[in-house]
Image (cartoon, rainbow, N blue to C red):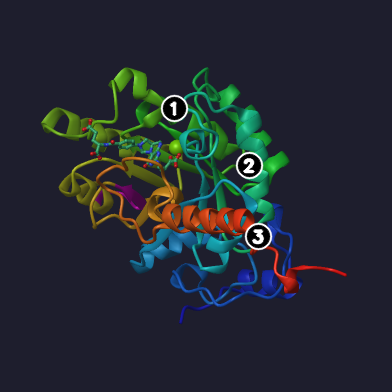
Amino acid sequence: MTQISPAQTQDEQQGTQGAQGRNPGTAAKPAGDKSLYGGVRSRRVTVRDIAAAKARGDKWPMLTAYDAMTASVFDEAGIPVLLVGDSMGNCHLGYESTVPVTMDEMTLLSAAVVRGTERALVVADLPFGAYQEGPVQALRNATRLVKEAGVGAVKLEGGERSADQIKLLVDAGIPVMAHIGLTPQSVNAFGGYPVQGRGEEAAQQLLRDAKAVQDAGAFSVVLEAVPAELAAEVTRTLHIPTVGIGAGLDCDAQVLVWTDMAGMTKGRVPRFVKQYAQLREALGGAAKEFAEEVVSGTFPAAEHTFH
Ligand SMILES: Nc1nc(=O)c2c([nH]1)NC[C@@H]1CN(c3ccc(C(=O)N[C@@H](CCC(=O)O)C(=O)O)cc3)CN21
Ligand SMILES: CC(C)C(=O)C(=O)O
Ligand SMILES: [Mg+2]
């Protein structure tokens, strides 16, 4: 459908896949987004592919992943961008929020997601405290995620306040996804997770934040929990893609936390979540059935037994 550039064809022939390249090989048929791959599925999605998608007006999906096996499921399903979100704090590591997540935890789980995937662009969050001290700290920690985990890009929260960090990372050759609107690492300052950008003043600030991250060189920007009309205006204004979560239908891409999307999350999920499966129920049911069969002596059966 889309023309393959000479550079892409060469990548394909040589099988070179950049910093993330490993496990090249046969691919299951992706059922998800195809446009971002531009017809080439033998290498990783790159930030150039993302820029081309906006130019074509193609929408794309992003999911979080925190382990190799789940990441491989999404990679095979054709999800072109996977985020090792600091939402691993509450969704994988058992913390109350994203705030306690460390660089060691991010690095370990990001490396697992890279190992579990062949084609997705893997983006890792810089956790709270890993970039607030300034651009040099941000570069040191982003470099660690690129070198030790093999991610293709990093994400950090904040608009104007994080522009200097974004600039230095981009200058150093690390692609940056920005994140504005509701920035969950500021939960203690927000006093919860309220919708952002309501009212004229807040809307103007969000537009300034969006322009600041684009000017700093971000390749895309997450808009979290902002009114749809404002997100649409940001999406029209910017030349980089907007990735919405609770930001309406007019963003260039959409992201959800995978445990929310699959019905695995315990308890209440945010209003912007759609559950496409009921994994919590399914997995709990399997565990109960296993338990019952052990207690009743019906598992293991003959076919599970050696003699
Ligand atoms: N499981 C999960 N899903 C997420 O989307 C997510 C995380 N965890 N952790 C990191 C941040 C935190 N986020 C959140 C968390 C809660 C709401 C929430 O409960 N929103 C309320 C409205 C809140 C209010 O107005 O006070 C809602 O009803 O959606 C929103 C975003 C988004 N991110
Ligand atoms: C919700 C997404 C955008 C995120 O930052 C995360 O999962 O940590
Ligand atoms: Mg995050």
Location of residue 87 in the rendering, given as x and y in whole percent from the top left corner: 46, 38
List the residue tagged with mark 1: 96
Label 2 secondary element: helix
Q: CA distance from mark 2 to mark 3?
A: 38 Å
Q: Is mark 3 within 8 Å of ligand 1?
A: no
* Residue at (72, 40) in percent of width and height: 148
Mark 2 or mark 1, which is nearer the start of the sequence? 1
* Residue at (32, 39) in percent of width and height: 210
Structural crowding at the residue carrying mark 1, measured as other residues with C-alpha within 10 Å and reported as few (<14), some (14–19) or many (≥20): few
Q: The disc labelled 3 sits on which kind of residue?
A: Gly
- The reply to whether residue 265 is in sight is yes
Seen from the viewer's position, the closer of residues 296 and 261 is: 296
Specify start and end residues of the magenta stretch as a single range: 237-245
Q: Quadrant of residue 267?
A: top left
Report the mark closest to the observer, 1 or 2: 1
Q: Quadrant of ligand 3?
A: top left
Mark 3 or mark 2, which is nearer the start of the sequence? 2
Mark 1 or mark 3, which is nearer the start of the sequence? 1
Location of residue 214 in the rendering, given as x and y in whole percent from the top left corner: 39, 42
List the residue tagged with mark 3: 297
> Residue placed farthest to the bottom in the image?
1
Q: The disc labelled 2 sits on which kind of residue?
A: Leu
The total number of labels drawn is: 3
Q: The disc labelled 1 sits on which kind of residue?
A: Glu
Q: Are marks 1 and 2 in contact (CB under 8 Å)?
A: no
Seen from the viewer's position, the closer of residues 217 and 114 is: 114
Q: Give yes or no for residue 238 being in the magenta stretch.
A: yes
